[in-house]
Image: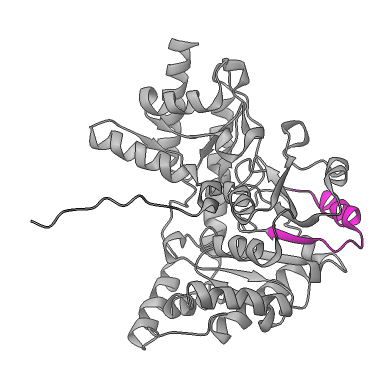
Amino acid sequence: MPSTTQYELQLARRMSRLGTETAFEVLNKARALERQGKSIIHLEIGEPDFDTPSDVVEAAVDALHKGWTHYGPSAGLPELRQTVADYVSRTRGVKVAAEEVVVVPGGKPIIFFTIIALIDEGDEVIYPNPGFPIYESMIHYIGGKAVPIPLREDRDFSLDVDELASLITDRTKLLVLNSPHNPTGGVMPRKDVEQVARVIGDRNILILSDEIYSRLLFEGEHFSIMSIPAMQERTILLDGFSKTYAMTGWRMGYGVMRADLATHITRLMTNSNSCTASFTQIAGVEALRGDQSSVDHMCAEFKRRRDVFVAGLNKIRGFSCRMPHGAFYVFPNIKQTGWKSKPLSDTLLEQAGVAALSGTSFGAFGEGYLRFSIANSLENLQQALDRVDQWTKKNL
């Protein structure tokens, strides 16, 4: 028999700097418990529990039958790029051309490509903390310096503009904004967005504005830093279809940016994914141009669930929760329980059968909090509240 030689896997050093997204790890753990026969209520994953609108599905099926199954341009199909340009022009009050749009498979590639294209080793990137973990992961991976701007509960999880000003140095190349915000559900008021623009002033700092939850806003109107005069050319807008149209598995997002940067982001698409699936892009055109009532219905339902869930959390011993204004997450303060975030989230999963995420999954400033996704039925949300309440009564 031939002998088997065991070779050591020698990863590049940069791989040790790459983080992860804890939601998927907790989901896997929760499913393993379910396979053991345990009842688990899933409030860990950031995915709408609605079906993709039927007109969008039908557009994709029709596109498949019509042969939209081949390679397309790396930056996206011209019809979708123009549709996105028209949509962003209308919703952000700016003039956007199709050549400023790059369509990608999901929202994350815009984060990935932006940081790869702009950040050299040692360059500083200011990002929200707690915040979507891929920001920090990618900054470290590229060799940049991740500079957290804390989002604090007493500011309704909007950043402190004076604190932001103190963090900007000559090495600052990029600022990441996210509103409505994951994990807190916080929304930056227009005055804060305008103050951020004033703090940046005429510095050559670009902004990655993650607005993937822009249509899931419960009060007021969404305001983008792209809408501020002189900020459009310094803004990379990240948006997409996953959250708004319940299309997480379709993998389609887009970036809107100055045309010269779009050319380089397109080269990264060519070198990585070649292109986004053509038939999904045809469906994306229908999503943006078609009936929007499903979006309005989903947002209204999330608001209804938010109201019930936050009220319920505030009745549980050791929990206190501010009212989030967007997205589909709640971020309760659990400091009065006496528990750290990670041990409490683990214990609630194992003992109460409720899957949530530790606030530290979103950075060091998430300690003392948990994130619950309200993308589940009202019945299941109420059951989750009951389970957590019963656990606290027995253990606190």
- Which residue is rendered at x = 75% and y = 60% of the image? 207
Looking at the picture, tell me which residue is in the foreground, 148 or 98: 148
Q: Is residue 6 left or right of residue 120?
A: left
Give yes or no for residue 322 being in the magenta stretch: no
Looking at the picture, tell me which residue is in the foreground, 285 or 3: 3
Q: Is residue 104 above or below residue 343?
A: below
Looking at the picture, tell me which residue is in the foreground, 353 or 133: 133
Give yes or no for residue 201 being in the magenta stretch: yes
x then y, percent, for residue 149: 75, 42
x then y, percent, for residue 169: 85, 50
Q: Is residue 19 left or right of residue 250?
A: right
**Location of residue 131 (image quadrant):** top right
Q: Is residue 156 above or below residue 389?
A: below
- Which residue is rendered at x = 52% and y = 85% of the image? 73
**Which residue is situated farthest in the bottom direction here?**
66
x then y, percent, for residue 332: 60, 30
Q: Is residue 319 above or below residue 395?
A: below
The span shown in magenta is: 188-209
Quadrant, the N terminus:
bottom left
- Which residue is rendered at x = 67% and y = 33% of the image? 365
Q: Is residue 230 left or right of residue 359?
A: right
x then y, percent, for residue 81: 60, 80
